[in-house]
């Protein structure tokens, strides 16, 4: 592909229509941040509200996460006065502190397997090779900051977004209740509500880390209290927006809602959610639809699951290509990386679901 620096620009850094989020920054740059435009005025908002969510995503907090130590302290630069939002753009910044770019210098021309090095180089003809630059999972710190605002607005409307890990490399958690998810998820390093499965998952992750390898898994996100009627036919279906939002997370390779891919194994009589009356309200007896029919919310819990790939940066010897010399090479990735990204991805997935829901809610209120 031919490149011209005057015409090849990066787009696709903004998300949402009425509640619009633009993230910026690279993994080893000076800082990362986000601009949130469209937040309603009068919302009580402090840095502590944002920090709580960032602390959940923060690296270096357990034996199964990267050793990179970042406080991820957020600073609100605009859009808030006297503790309340102004209705103007909210800009937030997080400084990069614990940066070690030296381990990336020998790899600056190598297309690391599983990483975006090759594709970014093909598209732009230039990239920040330090820590993956813009393609790094560290970009998600900005999403979580924006998602914290969305979650606070939703909470004021009695909507709750909660996530948990349901599978790691074939170790599957049992079915759990909402109460167990709320109580248990943050009590263990894996963020799995099934505490027995969590022990097995953590042991496996430590074993794989010792081998210089990595594992993936499945994260589930529930949205509770979502009113019926959210979503725009035909191309802006709520499930389509959720799928795009969740697929935009770098490590995600698949999304399913409700019964998801298991729907392909069911008969119509098994898949259809029959309706009934409950205290003057229409309810569904089952929730195979995942709270969405025809792209519009039904009022039942919205259920999303994402397939998360194994972390691409592994210490095992791999074969690749030097893009400058155009010759094959062998490469071993060093540095600080998560052996499994699933636990730290939970707040990121929650943030993306929250951003979709608040944007959809604001669009519905405009009608």
Image (tube, grey):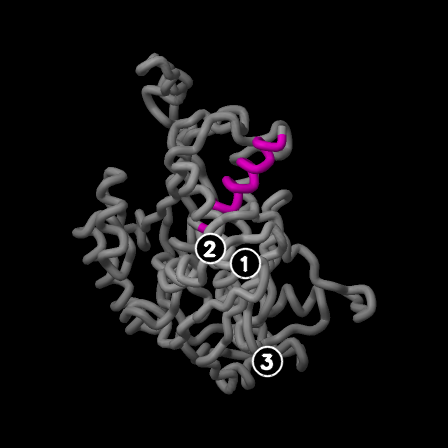
Sequence-wise first label, 2 or 1: 2
All told, the count of numbered labels is: 3
Residue at image coords 43%, 47%: 306
Q: Residue furthest left?
A: 196
Q: Quadrant of the N terminus?
A: bottom right
Left or right: where does residue 291 sit relative to residue 175? right
Q: Establish if 311 lies above or below 220.
A: below
Whether residue 168 appears in magenta in the rendering, the answer is no
Q: Are marks 2 and 1 in contact (CB under 8 Å)?
A: yes
> Where's residue 170, x and y in %?
30, 50
Give the residue at mark 1.
80
Q: Secondary structure at mark 1?
A: strand
Q: CA distance from mark 3 to mark 1?
A: 41 Å
Q: Are marks 3 and 1 in contact (CB under 8 Å)?
A: no
Whether residue 358 appears in magenta in the rendering, the answer is yes
Give the residue at mark 3.
108
Q: Nearer the viewer, residue 134 or 42?
A: 42
Q: Which residues are magenta?
A: 351-366
Q: Select label 2 or label 3 by which is in front.
A: 2
Sequence-wise first label, 3 or 1: 1
Q: Secondary structure at mark 3?
A: loop
Give the residue at mark 2.
45
- Image quarter of residue 30: bottom right
Q: Establish if 355 lies above or below 191.
A: above
Residue density around tag 1, few if under 14, some if 14–19, many if 20 or more, within 10 Å: many
Q: Nearer the viewer, residue 326 or 348?
A: 348
Q: Secondary structure at mark 2?
A: loop
- Image quarter of residue 362: top right
| Secondary structure predominantly adopted by residues drawn in magenta | helix
């Amino acid at each position: 592909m031919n490149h011209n620096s005057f015409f090849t620009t990066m787009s696709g850094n903004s998300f949402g229509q009425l509640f619009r989020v633009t993230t910026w920054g690279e993994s080893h740059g000076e800082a990362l941040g986000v601009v949130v435009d469209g937040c309603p005025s009068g919302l009580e908002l402090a840095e502590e509200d944002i920090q709580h969510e960032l602390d959940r995503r923060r690296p270096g907090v357990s034996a199964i996460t990267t050793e990179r130590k970042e406080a991820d302290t957020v600073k609100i630069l605009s859009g808030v006065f006297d503790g309340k939002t102004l209705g103007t753009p909210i800009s937030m910044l997080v400084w990069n502190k614990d940066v070690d770019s030296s381990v990336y210098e020998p790899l600056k021309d190598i297309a690391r397997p599983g990483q975006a090095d090759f594709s970014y180089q093909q598209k732009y003809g230039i990239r920040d090779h330090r820590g993956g630059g813009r393609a790094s999972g560290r970009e998600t710190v900005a999403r979580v900051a924006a998602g914290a605002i969305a979650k606070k607005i939703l909470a004021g409307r009695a909507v709750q977004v909660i996530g948990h890990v349901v599978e790691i490399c074939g170790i599957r958690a049992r079915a759990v209740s909402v109460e167990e998810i709320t109580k248990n998820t943050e009590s263990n390093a894996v963020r799995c509500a099934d505490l027995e499965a969590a022990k097995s998952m953590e042991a496996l992750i430590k074993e794989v880390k010792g081998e210089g390898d990595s594992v993936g898994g499945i994260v589930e996100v529930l949205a509770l209290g979502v009113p019926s009627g959210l979503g725009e036919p035909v191309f802006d279906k709520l499930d389509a927006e959720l799928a795009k939002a969740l697929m935009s997370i770098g490590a995600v390779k698949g999304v399913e809602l409700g019964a998801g891919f298991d729907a392909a194994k069911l008969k119509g009589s098994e898949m259809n959610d029959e309706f009934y009356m409950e205290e003057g309200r229409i309810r569904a007896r089952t929730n195979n639809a995942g709270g969405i029919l025809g792209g519009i919310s039904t009022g039942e819990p919205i259920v999303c699951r994402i397939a998360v790939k194994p972390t691409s940066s592994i210490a095992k010897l791999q074969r690749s290509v030097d893009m400058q010399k155009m010759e094959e090479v062998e490469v071993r990735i060093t540095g600080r990386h998560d052996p499994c990204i699933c636990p730290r991805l939970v707040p990121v997935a929650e943030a993306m679901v929250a951003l979709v829901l608040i944007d959809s809610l604001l669009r519905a209120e405009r009608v």
